[in-house]
Image: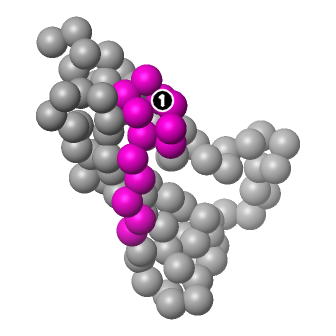
Amino acid sequence: MNNARRLGGWLGVLLLGVVLRGADPLHAQKAPFANEDVFDIEYASDVRISPDGSAVAYVRYAMSIMRDRREGRLWIVGADGSSH
């Protein structure tokens, strides 16, 4: 239970980091959200924890500007945040 709670907290930080990626106040946009801005958004989904609790796998989605579609890539990270 303790490992699951720790992983849950870590996953929250990971997802927040993905959402806030590019939210740098020094480079804040002056204009409203434009159509092209969708290509800068990335998010995590389909999070799975390994049976022994040592790793977390998730799909990191982003829009491909060349293919004009959503693409997902599988990422695996150690439960302690190492080996990403």
Q: In the image shown, does 2 or 36 lie closer to the viewer? A: 2
Q: Position of residue 28 (x, y in %)?
A: 77, 49
Q: Left or right? Give the position of 73 relative to 7.
A: right
> Which image quadrant is residue 65 in?
bottom right
Q: Left or right? Give the position of 63 relative to 35.
A: left
- The residue depicted at 32 percent of the width and 35 percent of the height is 55
Disc 1 residue type (three-letter):
Gly
Q: Position of residue 83 (x, y in %)?
A: 50, 38
Image quarter where the N terminus lies is: top left
- Asked if the magenta segment contains residue 47, the reply would be no
Q: Residues within 10 Å of mark 1 (few under 14, many from 20)?
A: some
Q: Name the residue under label 1.
A: 81
Q: Left or right? Give the position of 50 relative to 19.
A: left
Relative to 9, does residue 14 appear above or below in the rendering?
below
Q: Position of residue 76 (x, y in %)?
A: 39, 47
Relative to 18, does residue 9 appear above or below in the rendering?
above
Q: Left or right? Give the position of 47 relative to 61.
A: left
Q: Is residue 66 visible?
A: yes
Q: Position of residue 14 (x, y in %)?
A: 46, 36
Q: What element carries label 1?
A: loop
Q: What residue range appears in magenta?
A: 72-84
- The residue depicted at 74 percent of the width and 42 percent of the height is 24
Q: Can residue 12 be seen in this view?
A: no
